Image (cartoon, rainbow, N blue to C red):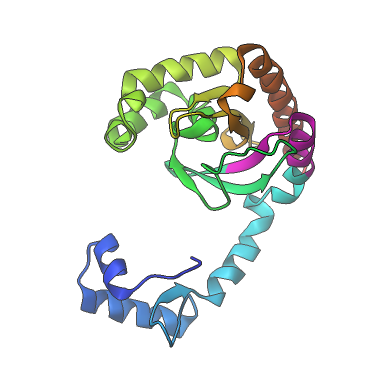
Amino acid sequence: MPDGAGTTTVASRTGITRPTAHRLLTALVSEGFVDRDQQSGRWLLGPELYLMGAVAADRYDITDLAREHLQSLAELTGESAFLSASRGDESVCLSRRDGSFPIRSFVLYEGKRFPLGVASAGAAMLAFQSDAWIEQYLERAPLEAEHGAAHAPDAVRERIAETRRLGYAVNPGLIVEGSWGLGAAVFDPAGKPAWALSLTGIESRFTPARRGELGRLLLQHAHRLTERLRGR
């Protein structure tokens, strides 16, 4: 979404033959889970998925609760503020609020996914998983192959240790040079790092002194949002 995908693309990404992909997609159309654009022939998400998402939103979607925190972070810092969620081995950006500073980073936006440990939000959520879960994840996740030597297992472990020490994660331009980010985990009622608040901007805005200030502000809002979730 929003452009849809052709049958060949779906077949390639799922590792099944084109005829099988077409047959399965056609069956999903009949159930309302997939739709098809009659002009382009591309497949899109269907209305039943929207209904399923709406039903699940009360449990998993915290964007309404987080809105005031994102707005406050954007206003106080001038940077872009984000809410991301942990989904399996990935972080997914759910919401963005831009601050007043005119130069912005567009590495992260609604719907953008990164593996955990990549980008500040995913790094924050990974850091507060159990040690055993982290080691299993690093064994199965090809972070170095996809994102370079800065995401080799030992480098990720070092950033995990730093994140635990500071309380928030720092991405020093590892995805796009000159684009920095800070992230703080938000915990669900069971104590799992299920979401993260983050700030991104250009490197000159993330000096050592200001990083401390931004990190403390992020942690305050992440803690308040965690407390609100516990009382929901």
Q: Is residue 228 left or right of residue 109?
A: right
Residue 64 in the image, given as x and y percentages of width and height: 75, 50
Q: Which residue is depicted at the point 20% across and 71% down? A: 17
Q: Is residue 167 above or below residue 129?
A: above
Question: In the picture, residue 185 is in which quadrant?
Answer: top right
Q: Is residue 217 left or right of residue 111?
A: right
Question: Foreground: 194 or 41?
Answer: 41
Q: In the image, which residues are magenta?
A: 68-84
Q: Is residue 229 above or below residue 54?
A: above
Residue 82 lies within the magenta run: yes
Q: Is residue 78 above or below residue 63?
A: above
Q: Is residue 34 left or right of residue 99?
A: left
Q: Which residue is depicted at the point 58% across and 30% down? A: 202
Residue 12 in the image, given as x and y percentages of width and height: 25, 64
Residue at the farthest bottom position? 38
Q: Which residue is depicted at the point 70% across and 49% down? A: 63
Q: Quadrant of the C terminus?
A: top right
Question: In the picture, residue 223 is in which quadrant?
Answer: top right
Residue 95 in the image, given as x and y percentages of width and height: 64, 48
Question: Foreground: 155 or 55?
Answer: 155
Residue 53 in the image, given as x and y percentages of width and height: 59, 63
Question: Foreground: 43 or 180?
Answer: 180
Q: Which residue is depicted at the point 41% across and 76% down? A: 43
